[in-house]
Amino acid sequence: MRKVYPTAVEAVAGLLADGMTIMSGGFGLCGIPTGLIEAIRLSGVKGLTVISNNAGVDGAGLGLLLESRQIRRMVSSYVGENKLFAKQYLSSDLELEFNPQGTLAERIRAGGAGIPAFFTKTGVGTIVAEGKEVRAFNGENFVMETALAADLAIVHAWKGDAEGNLVYRKTARNFNPMMATAGNVTIAEVEHLVETGSIDPDHIHTPGIFVSRIVHVPDPEKRIEQRTVRIRQKETV
C-alpha cells in the first residue's frame, strides 16, 4: 500500500469531514505538523474538535484554524500564548476542556493502547474531579479519567521511511508518539524521508503499522514562541 503522498493537501484528501475529532502533535510550536494544519485550513472543514497540548499562537500553528473559525472545541492543557483563543472562549464561540498536562498525555496514551479509563491522583479535590468517579485505593482517593481517541491524528517527525516508521527529535517527542497510536487514521509529515530499512529498528519511536499516510516536508518553518535570551554583557579586560 502506497503511503507517501506528494503534498499535504493530497495527504488529507478524502479524510476530512465537518465535526470530526483531530489530534495534533507537538509541544508549543515545537514539532507541530505545520504543513498538515495548513492543508486542513485550506480544506475549509468546520466544527472541529481538536486535541492538542496547546492551541498554537496567534497566526501560527493551530492559531490559523482559530482565525478561520474551523475549531469548535479544544481539548488542551495550555492555551496561554494565544490571545485569539482567549477572545473566542470568553465570547462563548469556542468550547474548552482543560486537562492537567500529564493527565492529557496519559488519556491519549490510553486511547492508543485500548485502555478505556484509568485512575489518577491528579485533580482530586479540585474542579478537575467534578462529575467524575472518585475511588479510594490503599486509603487514598483517585479520580477516573477516560481515554482519548480521534478520527484523525496529524504528527510531525524528524525522520521517516516509506513504511511510516518514525523518529522524533528532542522536544518534538512529547506528544507526537502517543497521538500517532490514538488516531483511527494517522498522517505523518517528516523532515527527512529515507529509504525503507535504513532506520535502525532500535531507533524507531513509532512503528509504521500506526501510520496510514506520509508527506515529505523538508525544511519546515520552526518558530520560537518567546525569545528569552539576555543581552550579552561586554567583556572586561
Image (cartoon, rainbow, N blue to C red):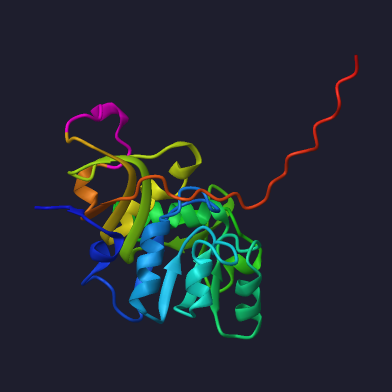
In the image, taking residue 150 as reference, residue 230 lies left or right, namely: right
Figure quadrant of residue 22: bottom left
In the image, taking residue 189 as reference, residue 68 lies left or right, namely: right
219 falls in the magenta region: no
Q: Position of residue 87 (x, y in %)?
A: 65, 78
Q: Position of residue 41 (x, y in %)?
A: 40, 72
Q: Position of residue 54 (x, y in %)?
A: 54, 60
Figure quadrant of residue 19: bottom left
Residue at the top extreme of this rendering: 237
Residue at the left extreme of this rendering: 1
* Residue 107 in view here: yes
Q: Position of residue 104 (x, y in %)?
A: 49, 57
* Residue 117 in view here: no
- Give me the residue at 50% from left, 61% from top: 61
Magenta-colored span: 197-206
Q: Main secondary structure of the magenta part?
A: loop
Is residue 140 positioned above or below 10 on the image?
above
- Give me the residue at 86% from left, 26% from top: 234
Give the quarter of the figure containing the C terminus: top right
13 or 87: nearer the viewer = 13
226 or 72: nearer the viewer = 226
Is residue 215 positioned above or below 167 on the image?
below
- Give me the residue at 17% from left, 36% from top: 196
Figure quadrant of residue 25: bottom left
